[in-house]
Image: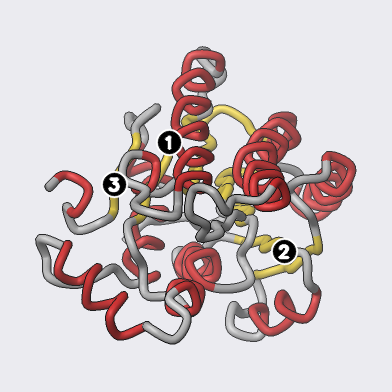
Amino acid sequence: MYNLNNRTAVVTGGGSGIGLAIAKRLAQEGARVVITGRRQQVLDEALATLGENAVGLVADVSSASSLEALYAEVKRLFGGIDVLVANAGGGVHAPLGKITEEQIDQQFSTNVKGVVLTLQGALPLLGSGSSVVIIGSTSSMDPGPTMSIYGGTKAAVRNMVRSWTAELKGTGIRINILSPGPTNTPSLREAFGGDVEAGMAFLTAKSPLGRIGEPEEIASAVAFLGSDAASYINGVELFADGGASQS
């Protein structure tokens, strides 16, 4: 549907969950895909499902030196980046009164600092016509109980994208944020602990469509934003949540 032939895409946190689904879809659209993550074993398992046009490179998005090494290798292999997907991130459930310094530092380091460093390090490899997709979350406006820090990091990312859209004026680089709602991944189910059934029922009831999302549906939206079909879309936050955050 979206022609990404002869284009290079980098997907951070591409070894599992939504990131892996995004990598698969971009590869299906013809892109050369580079997935990153902190564990080689996870990347190797993901690569087995992605085909010959995929490469896995270990990188930590919270480390500028790690990203510098990543982008040097991407430049050596492919010369530049056409689609950059800043997907790496995560959240920790903790109620007010029990939030630890470690939890705050961990989430802001990956979800905010990591996004800044991911984009900043990639700038020399991004040219006119390239697309940056930042994976946000509906938690930026509706975090729910125990997710205040995670929601805060995603709200910060949304505001950074507003600023970066203006700063990238004249470069031809598009930047958008895609904010998924609850998505059917192992990490979502793990977050509910021993009460998965009740948690899924709550999220299903909240959705105007009567269900949560699938990783492939998020990936489809990323493929659109990364392609020429979205060539005049810039600086938006696209919610992929079945309408739940609007109700």
Mark 3 residue element? strand
Count neighbours of disc 1 (C-alpha within 10 A) and say few if under 14, some if 14 to 19, many if 20 or more: many
Vertical comparison of 76 with 115: above or below: below
Q: Nearer the viewer, mark 1 or mark 2?
A: 2
What label does residue 239 carry, if any? 3
- Residue 137 horizontal/vertical position (percent): 40, 49
Mark 3 → mark 2, Cα distance in angstroms: 25 Å
Q: Are marks 3 and 2 in contact (CB under 8 Å)?
A: no
Disc 1 designates what residue?
Answer: 176
Count neighbours of disc 3 (C-alpha within 10 A) and say few if under 14, some if 14 to 19, many if 20 or more: many
Image side of residue 31 versus residue 200, left or right: right
- Residue located at (37% from left, 83% from top): 195
Q: Looking at the figure, which quarter contains the N terminus? A: bottom left
- Residue 120 horizontal/vertical position (percent): 70, 31
Q: Nearer the viewer, mark 3 or mark 1?
A: 3
Mark 1 → mark 2, Cα distance in angstroms: 22 Å
The mark that comes first in sequence, 3 or 2, is 2
The mark that comes first in sequence, 3 or 1, is 1
Q: Amino acid at mark 2?
A: Gly
Describe the colour scheme in one phrase.
secondary structure
Q: Amino acid at mark 1?
A: Asn
- Residue 92 horizontal/vertical position (percent): 56, 59
Mark 1 residue element? strand
- Residue 31 horizontal/vertical position (percent): 55, 60
Disc 2 designates what residue?
Answer: 37
